[in-house]
Image: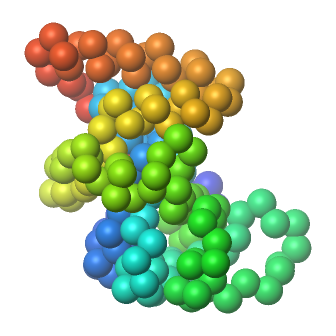
Amino acid sequence: MTDGLFDAGALVRVLQRHEVDFVIIGGIAGQLWGSSTVTQDLDICYSREKPNLEHLAEALRELHAKLRGVKEDVPFRLDARTLFNGDSFTFTTDFGALDCLGTPTGTNGYSDLKQAAETMRVGSGLSVRVCSIDDLIRMKRAAGRAKDRQALEELGGLRDERAAGIPKKPRSP
């Protein structure tokens, strides 16, 4: 497991190598849209189709994913069936924290977010699907946590700049 090291690019590369269908959401999505918010986890919304659950389980096993926030080592079988029977999982991996959400708050899941998602090139030539800024705002509003409410003003400003044709200044995750 990681000792405080977070490498979003490495997490994405493993997910892509296993052909996982996902959209980046959360803090990293905000950074890619230009937000100054710093995050130490990668949040994804994943397709809940059976083949994709199998791909995701394979990727998570390669990442040596373990449930995060569990005080003791509880039995947890990392396979497609377990992922199907759950919806949202928080993991610690070899490259840092990874949150896998099937149906993020305020959405209808992957197919909903995929519709407006944009493919962005980041880092060392990675192409990633990132939820739209409008969908990110929708999720933050629905979650309603203090940190989400704080992010809404900045995200709204970034959306307004984009609508006005001001180029975004993406931050590297």
Residue 73, visible in the rendered structure = yes
Left or right: residue 83 versus residue 154 is: right
Total count of labels: 0
- Outermost residue toward the right in this view: 72
The residue positioned 34% from the left and 74% from the top of the image is 20
Task: Report x, y in % for residue 5.
Answer: 54, 57
Q: Is residue 90 above or below residue 36?
A: below
The residue positioned 32% from the left and 27% from the top of the image is 34
Task: Report x, y in % for residue 138.
Answer: 46, 32
Left or right: residue 132 versus residue 101 is: left
Residue 32, visible in the rendered structure = no
Q: Nearer the viewer, residue 129 or 70?
A: 129
Colour mode of the rendering = rainbow
Q: Nearer the viewer, residue 36 or 55?
A: 55
Q: Is residue 57 above or below residue 145?
A: below
Q: Is residue 143 above or below residue 168?
A: below
- The quarter of the picture where the N terminus appears is bottom right
Left or right: residue 48 versus residue 105 is: left
Left or right: residue 154 versus residue 87 is: left
- The quarter of the picture where the C terminus appears is top left
Q: Is residue 26 above or below residue 67?
A: above
Task: Report x, y in % for residue 159.
Answer: 29, 20
Task: Report x, y in % for residue 76.
Answer: 73, 84
